[in-house]
Amino acid sequence: MAGYIVGVNHLASSTGSSFTLQSDTAIRIKRPFFVSPSGTRGHRIVIDMVPAPKRMVQRPNTNLIASLDNTGALPNRNPAKPRVEVAQFTGSQNPYIQRAFPQGRQMQRQPAPRRMAPQPVQSQQPRQQMPQQVPHQAPRQTMPQQHTGFLGLRNTYARGSLGLHMLTETSNEGGGGTFDAEFQPGFLLGGALGTQLDNGFRVEGEFLYTNANLKQISGTAANIVHNTEEVEGDMSSLAFMANVAYDFPNNSRLTPFVMGGVGMASLLLNDYRASSNVIADDMDWVFALQLGFGASFDLDDRTKIEVGYRYFETQDPEFSDANATPFESVYASHNFLVGARIDLN
């Protein structure tokens, strides 16, 4: 609007403030929008104004005024003065301002009740009482509120995952001997609650359960030499992790991310057997960490499909074999996940 604005006036009172722009031509409001706080700047509203079409100008000497009140026009009561039109766009009924400043509720103006005209009454019939006209009440209009999610946090979400669990071969060393264990591909189940920060980072708490069956044992276990695939038992884990993820910003519905997390894991050797000989049945709590990457795809405003990869490793656990002899093991896995993330706001 450079070149069109000829005057600016600001008036403050106990009930509010008004900001008036005077122009030498007719103008119209194109698109107001709200800008969130950034750095040292607070809430801002941006109002785009463009010259109005020529058909909107009724007289060449019209002065158009844009103010912050209900839309209206001042009558031309003094022929000696130029006609003044008032183009006002922010009132209780303006949806742009209601979305821009979600700080409360406003009621629409209620029309005055209509008066019913008196009805003639015939003398032959008893007088009938006319139903009372109930004034029409405008629907209550609620401005958008700033929502909070789970536990009062902003931008919270829930995530569920399942996937393929690939447990690497473990080397076990202890007083009863040294043996290696191989595992079949297993499964993973996971769930998380998190919050999306304003800088692209996400923080979340997650639990993971994995399970993989034994495939082969070779070496000396519980003082017995084995090299067989006639095995029974499985290894499972239950982990509680604190994760941090970063979503790379872009203009598409596909958002890549990287993540990492630390926590504690319970590792369980569930009834290890080789050739019907019991090897171990024990568990241990250890420190755990994980690193991963993936991408999410927006199905709609609240739901995202997420695929990713995780490398999971723990501190070396310690178990006891069937003879109560302690031995030390290792634990690491590769996990491929698919899941859904749902906003709770």
Image (cartoon, rainbow, N blue to C red):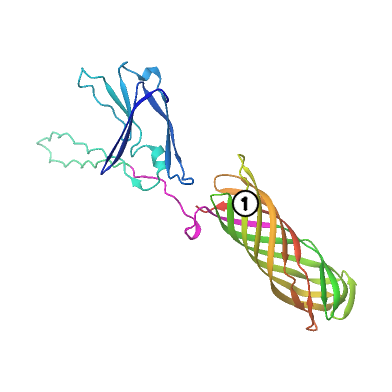
Inspect the magenta stretch and tell me whether residue 156 lies in it. Answer: yes
Is residue 133 shown above or below 262?
above
Is residue 284 shown above or below 290?
below
Would residue 340 be found to the left or right of residue 48 on screen? Answer: right
Coordinates of residue 301 in the picture (x, y in percent):
54, 45
Q: Mark 1 points at which residue?
A: 246
* Front residue of 255 and 199: 199
Q: Residue at x 80, y 84 (%)?
A: 323
* Front residue of 21 and 59: 21
Helix, strand or loop under label 1 = strand
Coordinates of residue 281 in the picture (x, y in percent):
76, 77
Q: Residue furthest left?
A: 123
Q: Which residue lies furthest to the top in this view?
A: 60
Q: Residue furthest bottom?
A: 323
Q: In which quarter of the image is residue 318?
A: bottom right
Q: Quadrant of residue 262?
A: bottom right
Would residue 48 be found to the left or right of residue 128 on screen? Answer: right
* Front residue of 171 and 119: 171
Q: Give the range drawn in magenta.
A: 139-162
Inspect the magenta stretch and tell me whether residue 79 lies in it. Answer: no
Q: Residue at x 17, y 34 (%)?
A: 117
Q: In which quarter of the image is residue 336?
A: bottom right
Q: Quadrant of the N terminus?
A: top left
Q: How many labels does the image show?
A: 1
Would residue 65 be found to the left or right of residue 44 on screen? Answer: left
Is residue 146 shown above or below 205?
above
- The residue type indicated by label 1 comes to Tyr
Coordinates of residue 286 in the picture (x, y in percent):
69, 71
Would residue 117 be found to the left or right of residue 317 on screen? Answer: left
Q: Crowding near pointer 1: few (<14 within 10 Å), some, many (20+)?
A: some
Coordinates of residue 292 in the picture (x, y in percent):
69, 55
